[in-house]
Image (cartoon, grey):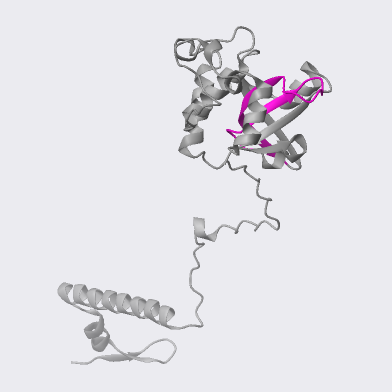
Amino acid sequence: MWLSYYDRFGVLIGIRRIEAIVAFTRWQRVGAAAVVGAVVVVGATSLVVQALADPSTPAAVSTPIPSETDAAPRATPTATAAPVPVATVAPLIPAVQAQVDYALAHWTNYNAAEYGVLGENDCVNFASQTLIERGWTMDATWNNPLTGNAYGASAAWRSSTALMHYMADSGRATALTDQQRDQVKVGDIAQFDWDNSGDRDHTGVVTKVERVGDTIAISFAGHTLDSDYRSVDTAITVDHPGGTAYYWSIP
């Protein structure tokens, strides 16, 4: 049954209808709350999806962490350092290597048992021994008895001036002056005229040739001033000032 009355402002209110509306059962109130919550959640999800899909909606921006590849590139050198020249020395042929090895092994350790020693003038005896190690053979003019008696050797074997003549006459070597140092090589024979009298006063075997620019320095090994790398320049300027050097180039 509906009962009606007008409120003090003249509004007709259906009392029974109001009660019907608000008088939910306890279980109806719980169900309604669940429905409302679901709607709110769905609505919120739709807003999030819409925000992600809508390009006009600003999104959160994260700052990237730089990696090694993002580092600023190193500057490229504008100039390249000039290469440093390295001197190269051609290997000696086996015959010359054997000759030099012998000279370096016996410039102080005399091979007296085989070749003997010529007192204080053993330079040519020693130079001749190195030529044997190089592969030369003795002949009638140039020889040593190999008995340990160097005085029994021929003049060409034990005298610097006689060796000079033997080299020139035999054709086994080519004469060079000190102005032809550019043609001198390791294994050649160096001879010296200390007083420029025309003879030869000392003999050695070339053990080093160094070229630096236009300068050529020659070193030699010998006996009677025992040496392995004696400087030609020192020999003719310090040891014997004004002396002259000569060479025999051996093919």
- Point out residue 224 in the picture as x, y percentages from the top left corner: 64, 12
* Quarter location, residue 29: bottom left
Direction right: furthest residue: 242
User: Seen in the image, is 178 located left or right of residue 71?
Assistant: right
Measured along the vertical axis of the image, is residue 172 above or below residue 150?
A: below
Could you tell me how many numbered marks the image carries?
A: 0
**Residue 71 falls in which quadrant of the image?**
bottom right
Left or right relative to 131: residue 226: right
Foreground pick, 69 / 203: 203
The stretch in magenta equals 185-212
> In which image quadrant can residue 162 be found?
top right
Inspect the magenta stretch and tell me whether residue 202 lies in it. Answer: yes
Residue extending furthest toward the top: 119
The residue lying furthest to the front in this view is 140
Q: Nearer the viewer, residue 39 or 56?
A: 56
Q: Relative to 55, does residue 248 appear above or below in the rendering? A: above
Res. 14 visible in picture: yes
Q: Please tell me which residue is depicted at 60% across the width and 7% down the height of the picture.
A: 119
Picture coordinates of residue 1 (x, y %)?
A: 18, 92
In the picture, the quarter occupied by the C terminus is top right
Residue placed most toward the observer, 84 or 73? 84
Which x, y percent locates residue 57? 49, 79
Q: Residue at x 60, y 18 (%)?
A: 158
Position above or below: 16 against 175: below
Whether residue 212 is situated above or below residue 203 in the rendered picture: below
Judged left or right of residue 78, residue 1 is left
